[in-house]
Every structure is written in structure tokens, then in C-alpha cells.
Image (tube, helix red, strand yellow):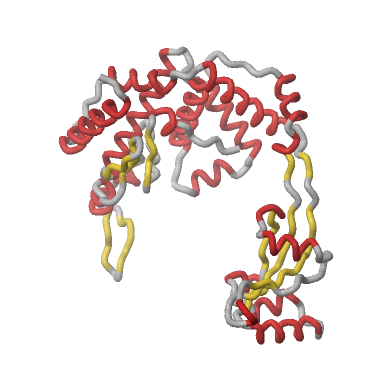
Amino acid sequence: MKIQTVLPILLGLQLCALTTRAIAQEQPKEMVDPSRIVLVVNGEEIKGSEYYRRMEYLQGVGFRTGNSFSEYPPGFITIQQIINERLIFALAKDKGAYPSDAEVDGEIKIRLAENPKMLENWIAGGGNMDELKYQLRVQIAQFKISTFGITVTDTEVEDHYKSHPDLFTAPKSLKLRLIAVATADETKIVDNDLAGGKDFASEAKEKSVDISKSIGGEFGTIPEFKLEATAREALAATKIGQTTKWLTTAKDGGSGTYLKFLLEDIIPAKLHELDPTLRRVIRRQLMLDKGHVKNPDVAKELDQQRVKAKIDIKQAEFADAYQKFLGAYLKQKGIN
């Protein structure tokens, strides 16, 4: 299960146009080596020194504070993200809620049980174990701060599950294939081919103008409620293994888009079993819900951490940018 970070919400910040991977320790040497060849363009080697310098000061990115967007280079955004994370840790320590190594290792085991390829995918994406543990420690700290002093019993979890079956039910879904053509004349050709015994997937590969033609018009398994009303109505009148009538918004048989679906299967709505994974999801959500009520001042507490924090940014331009940001942020929050 992937837990979304709530750091921007807690700190009143919304990062835009850039995702940073902040880490607790120096990155591996092979990642920051200025002589490392990062890419080659028309035979010209682009080395780490140019790549990291450009990335640090890339223009056109920034983050949102309140209702305004401010442009800041990625180097500053990374510094800001690291500061934010350290403020989370500082508040967690003040509350006695700083995640232990055992908690981090336990979280890794839980996630590996839920997704055995989690670690493999993380490493394939350029991460390492230290980075993973750091990111999980940040997430656990956020959760413990938000839910400080909150407990949820097994009975509460089970009652919530029984009282809200709609929240835990996979919706009715339809497995579909699609053929799309541009004219009414083409629909007749397709209909004649299908009536003559031509396989729908083969016809889609030959005649469809949709991007799905390369995979035989495979449209996927789609929750019924996500389909437009016209498509839902047409499919409701269609049996498994049959095709819908042609659906189009083209006027009077003119040019436009004409769609025909093959209904391959119907997957009925199904209530998810209350297994350990779902129990954990429900428990955590109930804890967060209670935390919003019991701990309404988390954002203020983090602001206090920001005000009293001793920040010494060595790059002058980033130090100046942080002071300007801090002034604007505190003014927007009404903090003197």
C-alpha cells in the first residue's frame, strides 16, 4: 500500500512541477561525480558537472504558497524540502513520536508483504535502501504526529467496515475491446467483416484509428460507472461476446468518431474481504480522521518549529531566497 505524503498539507506548502528525493546522507559518489557521463547528444557527452548545475538552477519551477505561485530553482526547492522534513523530525522528537529503526524496518516488511516487488521497483527507479528508510521515516513521523494520542480498536475497524460496504466494494466492471473509425461508410465495412466471421481484434488492428489498434482494440477492464451514459446504455443492452451498436456524436452520418465495443466479460461488484491489509488501511484512516479533531494545531506546531529553527544555508543566493520565502510565508500565516 502506498501512503501519500501529507507534508505539503501540514506545512501549508504545495510543491509544483518538481518532485525531489531528499535523503539524510550524501548521495553515492557515482551519482554526483562531475566527470560522469549522464547522456550523449549527437555524439556530444554531457557530464555530471553540467547536468547537476543545470538541474540545480533550472528555471520555470517553484511551489505554491497560499494562492500564489513563486518560482524557485530546484536547488532551493530541494533545500526547502529537506528543511521541511527536519522540522517534521524535530516536532516528532518533541512529542516523543520519532520513528525508531524497528518501526521503519517493520514498515518495509509490511509493504513487501503487500507488494513483493516494492523494493525491486524502488531500486530500479534509482533509489537505495538508505533513501527508502529515510522516506519511510518521514512518512511514519508525519502519521504519528497527526495521530498523536489516537487509538482505534479492532471493533471500531470492523464496525466501520460493516457500516460502509460501499467504500470497500469493487464496482461492477466491463472487459472491453474497441474499434473506432472516422466515417459512416467505414462502419459498414467493419460490420460486413464482422458479420462474415472476422475476429474483432484482427479487425481492430486493421481498421481502427484508436491508439488501441496495436493491441487488437483492447480497452481494458473498466468500472461501469466511469463510462459515459451513452456507452453504459449500449453495453447494458449487449450480451457477453456481442458488440454494441455504433456510438457517435457525428451529425447526420458525417465525419467524426464512430465507436463500437465488444463486451468480452462482466465482472460483478464484489465486497473486499476484511483481510489484514484492509484492516490496516481502515485503521489508519480512522486514526487520521480522529487526529484531525484531536490534533487540530499540527500546522501551527510546525510553524513554531520553522520560526525557532536555526537554518544556515551556505549558498548565498539560496540563503537569500529562503529569507524572502520565510518572510512571505510567515506574513501569509499571520505570524510575527
Q: Residue at x 29, y 44 (%)?
A: 74
Residue 312 placement (x, y as % from top left): 21, 26
In this view, 189 is above or below 107: below
The residue at the point 58 percent across, 20 percent down is 290
Q: Position of residue 70 (x, y in %)?
A: 28, 42
Tell me if I can see residue 214 in this picture: no
The C terminus: image quadrant: top left
Relative depth, front residue between 107 and 270: 270
Foreground residue, 38 or 180? 180
Is 92 placed above or below 202 here?
A: above
For the residue pair 132 and 243, the one nearer the viewer reads as 243
Residue 319 location (% of width, % of height):
19, 33
- Residue 4 at x, y = what percent? 52, 36
Q: Residue at x 81, y 66 (%)?
A: 238
Image quadrant occupied by the N terminus: top right
Seen as rendered, the residue at the extreme right is 239
